[in-house]
Amino acid sequence: MEEGDRTGCRQPRRPERPRSERDRQAQDGGAEGCPRRPRNPAESGPPDLVQLLTPQGERREHPDFSVEITPEEMRAIYRDLVLVRRFDAEATSLQRQGELGLWASLLGQEAAQVGSGRAMRPTDYAFPTYREHGVAWCKGVDPLNLLGMFRGVNHGGWDPNEKNFHLYTIVIGSQTLHATGYAMGITKDGSDDAVIAYFGDGASSQGDVSEAFTFASVYNAPVVFFCQNNQWAISEPTEKQTRVPLYQRASGFGFPGVRVDGNDVLACLAVTRWALERARNGEGPTLIEAFTYRMGAHTTSDDPTRYRVADELEAWRQKDPIERVKAYLVREGWADNEFLESVAAESEQLARRVREGVRTMPDPDPSSIFEHVYAEGHALVDEEREGYLAYAASFADAGTEGENA
Amino acid sequence: MAAVQAAGTQQWTMVKALNEALRRSMDENPKTLVMGEDVGRLGGVFRVTDGLHKDFGESRVIDTPLAESGIVGTAIGLALRGYRPVVEIQFDGFVYPAFDQIVTQLAKMHARALGHIKLPITIRIPYAGGIGAVEHHSESHEAYFAHTAGLKVVSPSNPEDAYWMLRQSIASDDPVIFLEPKRRYWDKSKLDPAGTPSLGLHEARIARPGRDLTLIAYGPMVKLCLEAAAAAAEDGLNLEVVDLRSLSPWTSTPWPSRSSAPAGPWSCTRPRCSWAWARSWRRGSPSAASTRWRPRCCGWAATSPPTRRPGSRTPSCLTWTGCSTLSTAPWPSEGVRRPS
Ligand SMILES: Cc1ncc(C[n+]2csc(CCOP(=O)(O)OP(=O)(O)O)c2C)c(N)n1
Ligand SMILES: [Mg+2]
């Protein structure tokens, strides 16, 4: 198995039949010659994948899902995609320059995030992982806010209720329960708001995610579980998480699951709108598996060349989420060069703003760590803050004297 | 909606006191919810939520799926939506599946959001031993929670405290781990539910004044210490018993400073030495932290640091042999008799 992973040989994605333990061992043990057909990601997944815009930028009809889109809306979506990608690239550069401690890039997942993000109303709530920069963008969160945690000047750093976008959650899967509980509250309020819980293919193995499915189903909560299957959980391929396509998990919990082309922004928009509408109408949760690909490293600390092959990346490059939108806009005559250039220029402006914003981000006062530990205070925190301040103050003289370190 | 409330002084068991505290909190604030396993129609395995389902309905008294992480995780979501969930964990030993949600999410979220959101969640846990239960039903895990910044941890020792402390916990905007000493569930005491609490949630109480030696305890061990003090009195020793009530934080020592002390025999209590009682294991247990008190009691310094009598580093006691035999510290030697 290890051997297979290193050489890029992968197990078949969908076994034809349940495999016996012996079959499995025979396969897993078969490192010699890496006999199995390497997965060809250029095949657009199984036939049940919802797609409305092909990688070549052609519209496709789907019997269950459709989307009406004006030229103006299409241009706005293109702008979202480009700006989000540019922001993400800038953050990666800033990490390289030592301005951020870490960055988790969304490269390749723009369509999944913008499509689902734009399906929400402002009053809908999103519960993200650490990679939902595109969703944050759609919810109107200032990109600079996202960088505070990665720079280490705070542990979260924004008011979740301001834009109905919860804090980034690093511990895998936890936020799906928060989303579900929040959705249960919506039901109690009698409101028609809805919630999206974002998570990854790796997270699908977490107990919290299964528990969230159970709670959401039992209480018919207005929550959409939006799983970005980007094929990798750091170095582990989806095959290490599941033996069935992820979207099929939903049926065991009693709600629908749909697999959508996660690189197709229109399909993601259409399917998420449908799922949110179901939620609003009291029809309960939906699982959406957005079939996509993490084009970058897991984070800036990761070296993906140790576990995946260049071919795979190249195959997915052919399915780029932005190129197809651009091709579509141009083919329809909805965008000219001037428009495309103006978006490019705007993205450079955004990058500049982010760069400057990060570099001038104020250092937190060390004593700020004592703030907000409790809403109603705590004697020990007060005591320790005082102790710290007295200690800090004891250096005041030394500072003016100069060099004595 | 709720049943007619009793007026005047009542003689209630701790279970009844807790039940009434829940009922009144739910009456007062329609955002207050009760959730947990079997808390609905059954009224909880200890009947603490008895009748609430009937009176408040299943939208506010929620029988949850059997999944502790799910219970606390969704309670967090409900709190984010403006609700005040009171979560019941069925038994101490079953909180661990929710430990991650409590320590990693619940405790930290207010700070992570720079104070913009609040998590007014109370997690009730029947804890500690003494009822002859099988394993996983007699655990003392208070130290885990008291160790975690962002959580408040309290434990009443009697029905009156149980009533007021639960109401105060539910009213608190911080997450509170509310540890219920299950062996004291059926103890009775007098209380006036329409009155006002005499102490803040995090204030300790002198449960018995005395001058020769101070016993410091909380939750289930307070009664034991009172019994020990009574036995010692027969031998001519005058023991003070302090009930911590709150394990995190301690806002003050129970001994008032000279300037603020009301007149009374206990204002000049000067324990020569003290004993800290806990059932959780010695290292890192609240009994360890209570040694911090020594130099701070109204300028007085004890002659020796408190002696600690925590539980031993073993699995929770075997019901058959009983718990008291397992503590590693010697019983007070200064003539204090062991209560039978
Ligand atoms: C509970 C927990 N275990 C391990 C980790 C370390 N970790 C961070 S990201 C990650 C992989 C997550 O994969 P996936 O859910 O597919 O999301 P992706 O990173 O691909 O977006 C792991 C193992 C973690 N953050 N939390
Ligand atoms: Mg993944």
Image (spheres, rainbow, N blue to C red):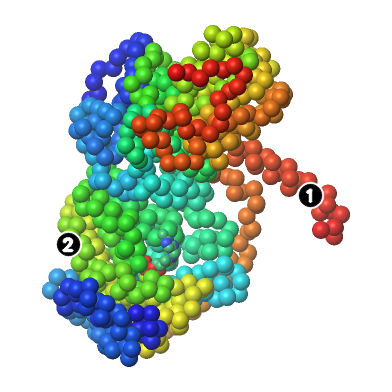
- Judged by depth in the image, the label closer to the viewer, 2 or 1, is 2
The quarter of the image holding the N terminus of chain A is bottom left
List the single residue furthest toward the right: A401
First in sequence, mark 2 or 1: give its number.
2
Q: Chain of mark 1?
A: A
Q: Position of residue B111 (x, y in %)?
A: 51, 48
* Residue B71 at x, y percent in the picture: 32, 45
A325 vs A279: above or below: below
Nearest the viewer among A210 and A388 is A210
Crowd rating for badge 1 (residues with CA inside 10 Å; few <14, some 14–19, many 20+): few
Q: Determine if residue B134 is in view.
A: yes
For residue A251, the mark is: 2
Name the residue at 28% across, 17% down: B5
Front residue (pair A78, B57)? B57
**Type of residue at label 2?**
Ser
**Image quarter for residue A332?**
bottom left
Q: Mark 2, chain letter?
A: A
At x 81%, y 54%, the residue is A399
Q: Is residue A357 left or right of residue A201?
A: right
Residue denoted by label 1: A395
Q: Please tell me which residue is depicted at 33% across the width and 85% down the height of the picture.
A: A31
Disc 1 marks a residue whose amino acid type is Phe
- Give coordinates of residue A365: x percent, y percent: 65, 52
Cα–Cα span, label 2 and label 1? 63 Å
Say if B223 sits above or below A300 in the image. Answer: above
Q: Quarter holding the C terminus of chain A? A: bottom right
